[in-house]
Image (tube, rainbow, N blue to C red):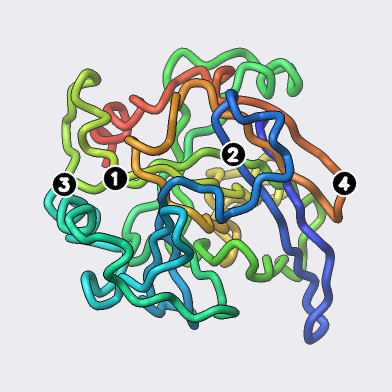
Amino acid sequence: MAGGSRSLAALVKGGAPSYRYVAAARPRRQARQETQRDDDHEAGAVRRGGRGASRVDRRRGQGARDLSGVIPDVAGAALTSAGLKRIRDHDPASLPLAPEGARLGACVGGVRNFIGVGLNFADHAAETGLRVPREPILFNKAPNCIVGPEDDVILPKTHEKVDWEVEIAFVIGDRAQNVAEEDALSHIAGVCVCNDVTERHFQTERSGQWTKGKGCPTFGPLGPWLVTLDEAGDLDNLDMWLDLNGRRMQNGSTSTMIFRIRICSATSRAS
């Protein structure tokens, strides 16, 4: 997929190959500010602590603040329209500072359905020589694909062709079923960066569905930031990049997406 810079640094732990990555997205108007720090984000939420922990932070130029006294986790009811309003109603300055140095978890918890859209960037379709799809190609990644942005990606023992793709992911907040396209954005709680890790040999060179190449544990790092739509800028014009072992491997933009964020409407009819 185009758009993003995957930064996976190869590691070996306990004999199992693994990777780490860095990926990011920002509005095109900020594309040249490549040294911009996380502190410069206007607002967003991250989850800190051990796997499955519920420490939640929000930034608004005042450092990371601890929201765990306001919501139990960035998940479920906290991501509905009413839940997000409850968060916005709290002055960040009134919240305690979040502790430094804790692990960054995936930016959303309690995910039950993880839907991917295949071949959704025009430049990626051209690169692969495949025809641009008329309908969105939907596939599932397992919920246990989701890990934090700095967690290891564990490769299957029989892996041959592991690939990675920086993506923009959207998180559904309000229940979405049979949603009209014009109403799609109202169901989205926010967006984040996702690394769609794939074992290509499993996916395309063996018979069956894509899921076996897409759905391995740890194959879907998210975050660190979940950014609400009022803070995200133009969703159709976000630069993304991904570095591998410190080397820039992907540069692209959401402007080349074939099916835009309103694809939430299509996925709502298939879930």
Which residue matches tag 4? 247
Q: Residue at x 74, y 23 (%)?
A: 128
Whichever of callouts 2 and 4 sits on the residue coming sooner in the sequence is 2
- Distance from disc 4 to disc 3, alpha carbons, whole Å, reads 39 Å
In the displayed image of the protein, which residue is found farthest to the left? Answer: 82
Height in image: 241 above or below 77?
above
Which residue matches tag 3? 81
Which residue matches tag 2? 25
In the rendered image, residue 166, in percent from the top left (x then y), is placed at 63, 41
In the rendered image, residue 215, in percent from the top left (x then y), is placed at 54, 56
Badge 1 density bin: few <14, some 14–19, many ≥20, Cα 10 Å = many
Badge 2 density bin: few <14, some 14–19, many ≥20, Cα 10 Å = many
Q: Are marks 2 and 4 in contact (CB under 8 Å)?
A: no
- Distance from disc 4 to disc 1, alpha carbons, whole Å, reads 32 Å
Badge 3 density bin: few <14, some 14–19, many ≥20, Cα 10 Å = some
Q: Who is closer to the viewer here, 202 or 23?
A: 23
Whichever of callouts 3 and 1 sits on the residue coming sooner in the sequence is 3
Q: Amino acid at mark 2?
A: Ala
Whichever of callouts 2 and 1 sits on the residue coming sooner in the sequence is 2
Badge 4 density bin: few <14, some 14–19, many ≥20, Cα 10 Å = few
Residue 271 seen from this side: yes
Which residue matches tag 1? 189
The answer to which image quadrant residue 231 occupies is top left
Q: Is 76 displayed left or right of 261 in the figure?
A: left
Residue 200 seen from this side: no
- Distance from disc 3 to disc 2, alpha carbons, whole Å, reads 24 Å
Q: Secondary structure at mark 2?
A: strand
Q: Amino acid at mark 1?
A: Ala
- Distance from disc 2 to disc 4, alpha carbons, whole Å, reads 17 Å
Q: Residue at x 24, y 28 (%)?
A: 184
